[in-house]
């Protein structure tokens, strides 16, 4: 079954975000109101292809029951590693595989992966073909308009669409623009036209500056041929962004407690898998602003939580 053929129109997706959309936070979002489709964090194909790095890669690819359906997103620059990883993902419970050709991270780009693939289209296509050949799962891509000029989409996207990906997510900015400028919504009609001309079966997903379900539905009313919309940073403003609900203080605190519980559970699993090591607590602090915001005393409470060093200390503060 091709998951992309069984989604509503428009469908909503939680954007894959490094250090954010891990197995713990995806479960929190599922509790608040899940999207139609989840993506994993980015997994490096070279890590999976390496005996030394495979265990770490598999940890990043761990899924929860509430994740389904979920797409595994992978990145790298070695075609043979894309092939090897794609072949393995079919047995790990994923509904599809997505190739990241859009990540703007400097370290990722230095290796030739992510958005740097825009500058090496032949390599990108080789990686896509290797992945597609190795699996029965639908293979999709996530990219940007271009590397430095939004007009690059005119040459870059036709190259990708000519490979007939199951879906194509386009972040409406270039790598150089990052998130410093407004998303180029004015280009949506042109993207629809390209998709319709080259690969009408490809699902078109728009990403960038879409904060919630309401904004996605408004965009779809204006551009009904777009199949789906991806929400990224909007989840930081409201974890209920895939619904029409605005969380109360009590509801947000409940979600925070769920996140702390999930962290404790994950920490125990990590300790068993890595004797003598502990799961870092610091990354958890990045999430506090999601739950502790918008009510009297929130900033003071958040400041106190930022000074904690363990779940026990956080619970004492709460």
Image: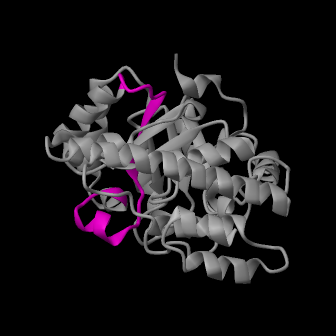
Asked where in the image residue 180 lies, by quadrant, the reply is: bottom right
Give the side of residue 298 with respect to residue 148, left or right: right
* 203 and 6: which is toward the camera: 6
- Residue at the far left: name it: 51
Which quadrant of the figure contains the C terminus?
bottom right
Is residue 192 in view?
no
Give the side of residue 183 with respect to residue 135, left or right: right
Residue 244 pos. (x, y %)? 85, 49
Q: Is 220 colored magenta in this rendering?
A: no
- Residue at the far top: name it: 1
Residue drawn at x 57%, y 61% is 172
Is residue 143 in view?
yes
Vertical side of 299 occupied by 13: above or below: above
Residue 135 pos. (x, y %)? 32, 23
Vertical side of 59 occupied by 254: above or below: below
* 199 and 65: which is toward the camera: 65
Asked where in the image residue 252 lies, by quadrant, the reply is: bottom right
Vertical side of 242 occupied by 104: above or below: below
Q: Is 102 colored magenta in this rendering?
A: yes
Residue stretch in magenta: 90-114
Counting the numbered discs, the total is 0
Residue drawn at x 63%, y 23% is 6
Give the side of residue 197 with respect to residue 315, left or right: left
Residue 233 pos. (x, y %)? 62, 63
Residue 7 pos. (x, y %)? 66, 28
Residue drawn at x 25%, y 49% is 275
Give the side of residue 248 with respect to residue 141, left or right: right
């Amino acid at each position: 079954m091709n998951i992309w053929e069984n989604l509503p129109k428009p469908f909503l997706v939680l954007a894959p975000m490094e250090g954010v959309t891990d197995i713990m936070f995806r479960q929190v979002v599922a509790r608040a109101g899940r999207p139609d489709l989840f993506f994993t964090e980015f997994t490096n194909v070279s890590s999976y292809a390496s005996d030394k790095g495979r265990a770490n890669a598999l940890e990043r690819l761990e899924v929860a029951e509430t994740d389904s359906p979920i797409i595994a997103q992978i990145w790298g620059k070695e075609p043979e590693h894309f092939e090897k990883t794609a072949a393995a993902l079919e047995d790990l419970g994923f509904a599809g595989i997505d190739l990241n050709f859009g990540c703007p991270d400097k370290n990722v780009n230095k290796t030739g992966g992510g958005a740097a693939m825009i500058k090496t289209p032949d390599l990108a296509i080789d990686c896509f073909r290797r992945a597609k050949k190795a699996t029965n799962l639908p293979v999709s891509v996530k990219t940007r308009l271009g590397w430095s000029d939004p007009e690059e989409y005119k040459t870059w996207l036709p190259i990708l669409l000519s490979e007939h990906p199951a879906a194509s997510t386009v972040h409406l900015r270039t790598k150089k623009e990052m998130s410093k400028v407004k998303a180029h919504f004015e280009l949506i009609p042109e993207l629809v036209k390209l998709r319709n001309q080259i690969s009408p079966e490809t699902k078109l997903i728009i990403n960038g500056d879409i904060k919630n379900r309401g904004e996605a539905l408004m965009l779809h009313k204006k551009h009904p041929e777009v199949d789906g919309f991806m929400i990224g940073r909007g989840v930081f403003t409201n974890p209920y962004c895939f619904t029409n609900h605005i969380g109360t203080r009590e509801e947000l605190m409940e979600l925070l407690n769920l996140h702390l519980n999930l962290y404790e559970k994950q920490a125990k699993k990590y300790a068993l898998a890595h004797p003598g090591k502990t799961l870092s607590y610091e990354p958890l602090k990045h999430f506090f602003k999601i739950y502790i915001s918008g009510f009297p005393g929130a900033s003071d409470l958040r400041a106190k939580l930022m000074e904690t060093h363990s779940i026990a200390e956080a619970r004492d503060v709460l």
